[in-house]
Amino acid sequence: MSLDSLTTLTVTHDGPVARVLFDHGEINLMDAAMMGDLWRLVKWLRAGGGRDVRVVVFESANPEFFIAHVDLALLAASVDNTEAAVGSFQDMVGAFRALDQVTIGLVAGRVAGGGMELLVNLDLRFAVTGRALFNQIETGIGVIPAGSGPQHLLHLLGRGRALEVLLGHDDLDAGLAERYGLVNRALDPDDVAPFLDRLVGRIATVPLADIAAVKATLAAPDLAAGLAVERSAFAEVLGRGAALPTMQRFLAAGGQTPAGERRLADLVADLDRPEPV
Amino acid sequence: MSLDSLTTLTVTHDGPVARVLFDHGEINLMDAAMMGDLWRLVKWLRAGGGRDVRVVVFESANPEFFIAHVDLALLAASVDNTEAAVGSFQDMVGAFRALDQVTIGLVAGRVAGGGMELLVNLDLRFAVTGRALFNQIETGIGVIPAGSGPQHLLHLLGRGRALEVLLGHDDLDAGLAERYGLVNRALDPDDVAPFLDRLVGRIATVPLADIAAVKATLAAPDLAAGLAVERSAFAEVLGRGAALPTMQRFLAAGGQTPAGERRLADLVADLDRPEPV
Amino acid sequence: MSLDSLTTLTVTHDGPVARVLFDHGEINLMDAAMMGDLWRLVKWLRAGGGRDVRVVVFESANPEFFIAHVDLALLAASVDNTEAAVGSFQDMVGAFRALDQVTIGLVAGRVAGGGMELLVNLDLRFAVTGRALFNQIETGIGVIPAGSGPQHLLHLLGRGRALEVLLGHDDLDAGLAERYGLVNRALDPDDVAPFLDRLVGRIATVPLADIAAVKATLAAPDLAAGLAVERSAFAEVLGRGAALPTMQRFLAAGGQTPAGERRLADLVADLDRPEPV
């Protein structure tokens, strides 16, 4: 599996951080070509080459469009096997959600329909103020969203706001997307680079297995199961052997002293961290 | 079933949009008369006459009170069959939540106690800034809320904010109600009419069966079940036959071109949409 | 069971309100001594002496630190029985969540790691603007949070924001903590005392059994179970006999009249409330 064959996405990676740029035609339409590339990307991240990657940032090369929406020709072509076609799309976006890596969507420009459904299956979302526009457009063109968007909007926005977005098929700007919980935060254009550099840099210090362990703790069906996952995941992380040396370095650098704890976030960022075996 | 017998509510409807005005005494007390009328309304919306309605907007004729709360005489009278009486109230407000139609509460003035519990069973909620006041008053008068308010507040507000509202029995204004997720948005008085006209107009273009399908996707017990509901609901919508012609009109109007997609929300609003058979 | 033996916490109580002050060394490190005291406190609140208490407010005597985090020596010492050690911590913080009483955390200064996990097991949380700093630091020092933090952050913040906090191990200030739903509200320093006095005073009028009943309605596994808990809890509250006299006083004071309902929150606060037998 290699990334050379991709035509709708540009993927660059430098150590633990990969950047994916949507770059497909005039509006980044999610057509068969882009879906095929997304499947190739997710398989690369699950298998050989992508296992060095810990954080994947998704952006668009097109300042006006993040992803327009799914190509309507695909919907028309699915009339005879609709449930299978929808299931296949659910599987594709769900494969991103199930990755061990952390995925981050940085939205500037428009994202609608199936593009929204890919977006809500990424782990973190940020919107650029004055540029991002979100629209779950399906009910405006005669269908309903069915690519897992309703499930994830329900949990992110709450039922009332999710229904407004699903049935009103109207634009949401970055500020409203933040207030509704659709994105983590709206960011002013000037703040995007320093903010993302800092966040991505911090996450990139976390071993892939630990990132996967944290994501797994959030997938338990109820509290008791979640607590059990936390216990076994913690034991596994400790068992990998890099935790205790890292904690030693933390203490040596001033951890658990007033001076060190006052600058906790920076102190931790400056640790020289050993890799787990 | 007709609406002629209602004495506490005024219902007007014009095509797919119905407007319900609470208009009962000095404070819109939710007494036996109002509860009876609410049952009549919900049955009308489920059966014959109301099947043309897609969106129901609830407002108050009284600028000071949306709904005061449940008549305390009803609570006192329920001492000998309390669980049945509470269950009957849960059934009534739950019947609104289960409607195929979209229900919208526009709160100006006070709403408390059982009025709050009706409100959180509506689909969308908006609050008029400077006028709306919310209060889950029960623990202030010696009882606890039991008409499904705790369940829905938990999901809308999160546990910490829900407990504050349930146990503090204090007023929340429109701004706080938005920040806590109790309402979709707080709206300035001057913005209410244009905002609601636009939103209601957009939702009213969606066929009733599609609205019901979207609401059903949000009622699944877990993600896997929800995805299955989305798949079958999508296939049903496509099978009704109005989707493909609508999508053709969308493409003809400029959908999937940069110029059309730039004005996506308006382009969709201007579509002349066929009705499903 | 008495509170005399506590060395890391100062507990004062006056009728239904208890105040707990973290006061342990330079940074309020959550070491074995503090954990032992927290267990003693929770047992006191469950048993004899603490049964008069209805509301417990947690603050810090240290303006810079609410709770630093768990003592790393405890993590290192747990290598041979990790799951049991983590489970014991989960039990301790979960015991606070399961209390009949309402617990409130007022955060000024830093709180990190296991201190965050105690905090999210309290019922209500408030942050002092300009002073509170929150950090789920574990992934920064080579481990992952496993003391129930992931479960509760998921529900309070939503998955995207929870993953940012869990994997970014960065500081959140009071304003961001409010926007993310980690705390109920951020409070300006000057507003803290009047705000908390009012809220605590209102909650303290609610009998302990009623507080416990409301908390229980929020612990049901699904909507149907939650509605059943609400019905039986309501019947129990009514059966205790203080509700009807309180409602009589409410009506006598102007309840269900326009003048009384206009000042609903204050009217209720001024009621002279009988105690349940």
Image: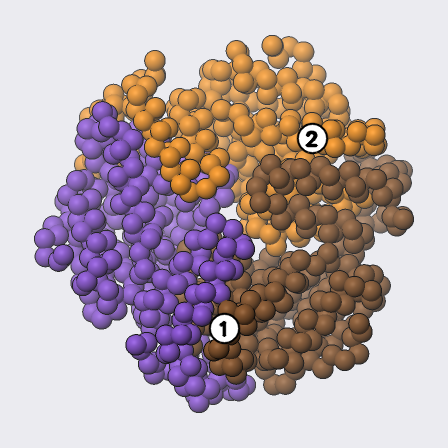
Chain colours: A purple, B orange, C brown
Q: Chain of mark 1?
A: C
**Disc 1 residue type (three-letter):** Thr
Quarter in which the C terminus of chain B is drawn: top left
Residue at horizontal 81 percent and vertical 39 percent from the top: C238
Disc number placed over residue A262 in the picture, else none: none
Residue at horizontal 17 percent and vertical 40 percent from the top: A32
Mark 1 → mark 2, Cα distance in angstroms: 47 Å
Write down the residue under mark 1. Answer: C82
Q: Position of residue A160 (x, y in %)?
A: 50, 38
* Secondary structure state at the residue bearing disc 2: helix
**In this rendering, which labeled residue sits more in front, label 1 or label 2?**
1
Q: Position of residue C134 (x, y in %)?
A: 52, 69
Write down the residue under mark 2. Answer: B87
Image position of A97 with respect to B42: above or below: below
Q: Position of residue A119 (x, y in %)?
A: 32, 48
Work out whether residue A199 or residue C13 is closer to the camera in this orientation and state it: C13
Q: Position of residue A23 (x, y in %)?
A: 17, 51
Quarter in which the N terminus of chain B is drawn: top right
Q: Answer with the quarter of the image where residue A151 lies.
A: top left
